[in-house]
Amino acid sequence: MPKGYWIGRVDVIDPKGYKEYGAAAAIAFKKYGAHFIVRGGKFESVEGTSRGRNNVIEFPSYQAALDCWHSPEYKRASPIRAQATQADIIIIEGYDGPQPS
């Protein structure tokens, strides 16, 4: 079964609020088995537009990623993020097929 991912491109406009969001969201992330693959970090935008921060969060399945987003735990954290950031977030299913050789 393919894993699920949240991919977030974020401009933080309130660092204190973003830190509060991280603490609140951690409850949902733990419950749904989230694992950060990318959390901020250095990047180079090589094509198109970008935001100041990028996050990739892995979940055990696509359904777990969706369930986390729609959970009461995350719904409590989401308004904090909305006040502290401008963000583009997608939930996407991972790929389990053949790889280039």
Image (cartoon, rainbow, N blue to C red):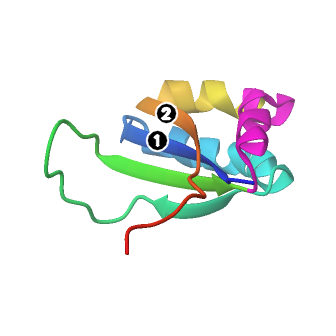
Q: Name the quadrant of the C terminus.
A: bottom left
* Relative depth, front residue between 51 and 13: 51
From the top left corner, tell me how far across and down residue 50 is, in percent. 24, 40
What residue range appears in magenta?
Answer: 60-75
Q: Which mark is residue 8?
A: 1
Q: Quadrant of residue 48?
A: top left
From the top left corner, tell me how far across and down residue 16 is, in percent. 50, 44
> Which residue appears at 53% of the width and 38% of the height?
17
Q: Which residue is mark 2?
A: 89
* Relative depth, front residue between 51 and 47: 47
From the top left corner, tell me how far across and down residue 61 is, in percent. 74, 50
Give the residue type at disc 1: Gly
- Callout 2: helix, strand or loop? strand
Residue 62 lies within the magenta run: yes
- Callout 1: helix, strand or loop? strand
Residue 23 in view, yes or no: yes
> Which residue appears at 36% of the width and 49% of the height?
53
> Which residue appears at 77% of the width and 27% of the height?
70
Residue 29 lies within the magenta run: no
Q: Name the quadrant of the N terminus.
A: bottom right
Q: Quadrant of residue 99?
A: bottom left
* Relative depth, front residue between 20 and 56: 56
Q: Which mark is residue 85?
A: none
Give the residue type at disc 2: Ile
